[in-house]
Amino acid sequence: MSDDAVPLVITVATRKGGSGKSTLVRLLAGELASRGSSVGLIDGDRQGTLSNWFEKVKANGRMPSDIDLVKVVSMEDVRSALARFAGKDAVLIDSPGELNMVAVSVAMSSDIVLLPVRSQQDDTDAGLETFQRLQETKSQTGSEAIIRFVFNDIQMLDTKSKGFERACRSLESAGGSWLTTLIASRQMFKEMNDGAGTLYTMPFVSEETIGKARGNVRVLVDEIGALLEGAQ
Ligand SMILES: Nc1ncnc2c1ncn2[C@@H]1O[C@H](COP(=O)(O)OP(=O)(O)O)[C@@H](O)[C@H]1O
Ligand SMILES: [Mg+2]
């Protein structure tokens, strides 16, 4: 994705467990690798869902060779993991549910922080709490990290609902912005999460479903790329 010597660093965070952090990291990793980027994954969550997926997919022989993973015991170790991935094109950091000060500072030293949220109120509330903490640190430290919400697990009908409208208004009134690309609710994503592979290596039954799933992530990565380019 970049020709620079320094990797592009993307942190995925939000306080709420189950909002789709690890899912988003897996999707981005697979898409970036399919574009020829070398990718370093840092699993900062003690629960280790990303590491478990990585090991399982690797054991199946379906992990692209240009994706590596380091599991850190505490967020303090993220810096050394980042140093280890200095030669990669992109580094993706999966954060724990509880963001301590170190996690916040790691996030704010990234190029972009993505906050996945479902459109349900408790999800947007939790996302907003994380956003406000990050935003505070951003203004205190002068960090240039871009912060964006990403709506996840969306049924396309949801976008016409009052709930979705309310979620947008509440993010907006807190000064938050979100990516126009929504991550749809997809069975394929669940299957990928269960250790089947990346969207480019997992077995699939229907060309149409895998095509839609890949297309969704392709547009997402294009939007992130355009945002980062605009920030340079
Ligand atoms: N877009 C989606 N479509 C289908 N299932 C999803 C989607 N996003 C997340 N999930 C499912 O929701 C659960 C929680 O997601 P996960 O990424 O592990 O959240 P987190 O890392 O924030 O705790 C997982 O079982 C995952 O497969
Ligand atoms: Mg997770």
Image: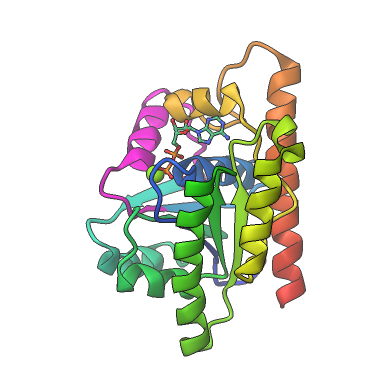
Task: Using the rendered image of the protein, determine whether residue 7 is visible from the camera's viewpoint.
Answer: yes
Residue 194: x %, y % from top left: 43, 25
Magenta stretch?
A: 42-67
Q: How many marks?
A: 0
User: Residue 156 sits in which quadrant?
Assistant: top right
Residue 7: x %, y % from top left: 54, 66
202 to the left or right of 68: right
Check residue 223 for magenta coloring. no
1 to the left or right of 10: right
What quarter of the picture does the C terminus occupy?
A: bottom right
Q: Residue at x 53, y 52 (%)?
A: 124
Residue 87: x %, y % from top left: 49, 64
Residue 132: x %, y % from top left: 49, 71
Please determine whether, in this image, residue 93 is positioned above or below residue 186. below
Please determine whether, in this image, residue 90 is positioned above or below residue 58. below
Give the colour scheme shown.
Answer: rainbow
